[in-house]
Amino acid sequence: MIRARTALPALVLSVLFCGACAFDPSSLPLPGAGVSGPTYHIRIEFSDVLNLPARAKVVANGAQIGVATNIALAQRDNGADHVVVDAEIGRDVELPAATTAALRQNTLLGDIHIALTTPPDGFARLLRDGDTIPVGQTRPSVRIEDTLAGIATFVQGGAVDQLQDLVTELNGVLPEDPARTAHIFQVLGEDVADLSVHLDQADQLLNGLTKDSEVMNRQRDTLAELLTDSAVDQVSAAVAAIVNVIGVLGGMAPVAHALTWLAPVTQSADSALGAIFPLIFTNRPLDLQAPSNLNALVAVIRDKLIPWVEHGPKVTVRRVNVVPAQGPPVPADDQVEQIVRVMRMIGVVR
């Protein structure tokens, strides 16, 4: 009898202990943590659900529409692991098949929940009971640990000191007068505003640079030859020669200053030659058969003056008597022809 009384409490304690080990407190519904009324089941795939609590809220457009009921690890066909979250959604909530899911938290230390985002024009096909939001439509949460580690790296890595040095250098560059500093930033603001107005021209500039880069890419072999050692030496020698030529031109500067008095003389000579050349030469100065003042002058000197000086006069005219002709009078045309013939003989006309 004593043994039975002793075994009974031990059995009760064992049952309670085993029941306590199998009991999951998170399975108990908490007030305000679930949804009332009928629900339908969906699955949400995540690549990572670190720190997602049990029975996490499912929120859409700022309102709770469901609750996560189970979190399990699964494996895709390609062998990669992912996490599947089972969720119960209120039956009166319609979610399109293109809904995206992300892990969010309202505060820095708050619990993580599942936030659903519905597209504005994707309600042609809705999620039904048993459907899945694939991993391609989900985003993992930003880990607080990673954020704090990034902040620690920023603070301890010397970035604050570098920022302080940058501010000091900027204060040294800017003028001491605040009005001038304000004017500088005003000009910069106007430049930015003007650039925003002429974005089409900026696009044309960028397109031109893109086309230039494409042309250079097509001429890559030629540019490679120009950048060889021998080509670089040739270009350097050519640049040195150009510099020497510029130096020679610079050395001629004193000579040019000494000859400045020739400028008005040259201008006067140019005017004189402009008046003499048309008088001496015609529009064909190299054609010796063409009539010109120079040819007439040469003919008079060669055919008239030189023979007269060499041989002297042959006939001395003392008196000229005009006797009327005995025959009929000479027509006027014949008289003009005889006069022209005589003038042509003496070289007056040709």
Image (cartoon, grey):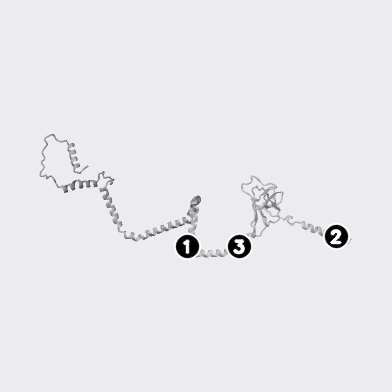
Circle nearer the N terminus (1, 3): 3
**Image: 179 above or below 269:** below
- Location of residue 109 by image quarter: bottom right
Let me know if residue 237 appears in the view.
yes
Residue 107 visible in image: no
User: Could you tell me which secondary element the residue under label 1 belongs to?
Assistant: helix
Question: Whole-Å distance between the Cαs marked 1 and 3?
Answer: 38 Å
> Which numbered mark, 1 or 2, is in the foreground of this view?
2
Residue topped by disc 2: 7
Q: Quadrant of the N terminus?
A: bottom right
Q: Position of residue 74 (x, y in %)?
A: 70, 52
Between residues 233 and 29, which one lies in front from this camera angle?
233
**Dot 3 corresponds to which residue?**
153
Q: Viewed as shown, does residue 167 lie left or right of 310?
A: right
Name the kind of residue labelled 2 in the image: Ala
| Number of disc labels | 3
Q: Earlier in the sequence, mark 2 or mark 3?
A: 2
Q: Residue at x 37, y 59 (%)?
A: 248
Local secondary structure at mark 2? helix
The crowding category of the residue bearing disc 1, from other C-alpha atoms within 10 Å (few below 14, some 14 to 19, many at least 20), is few
The residue drawn where x is 54% and y is 65% is: 165
Residue 180's label in the rendered image is 1
Tag 2: Cα neighbours inside 10 Å, few (<14), some, or many (≥20)?
few
* Location of residue 217 in the rendering, given as x and y in whole percent from the top left corner: 51, 51
- Decide which of 243, 33 is in the foreground and name it: 243
Q: Given contact means CB atoms under 8 Å apart, are the residues at marks 1 and 3 in contact?
A: no
**Quadrant, the C terminus:** top left
Residue 272, image x, y percentages: 27, 52
Q: Place residue 10 in its image quadrant.
A: bottom right
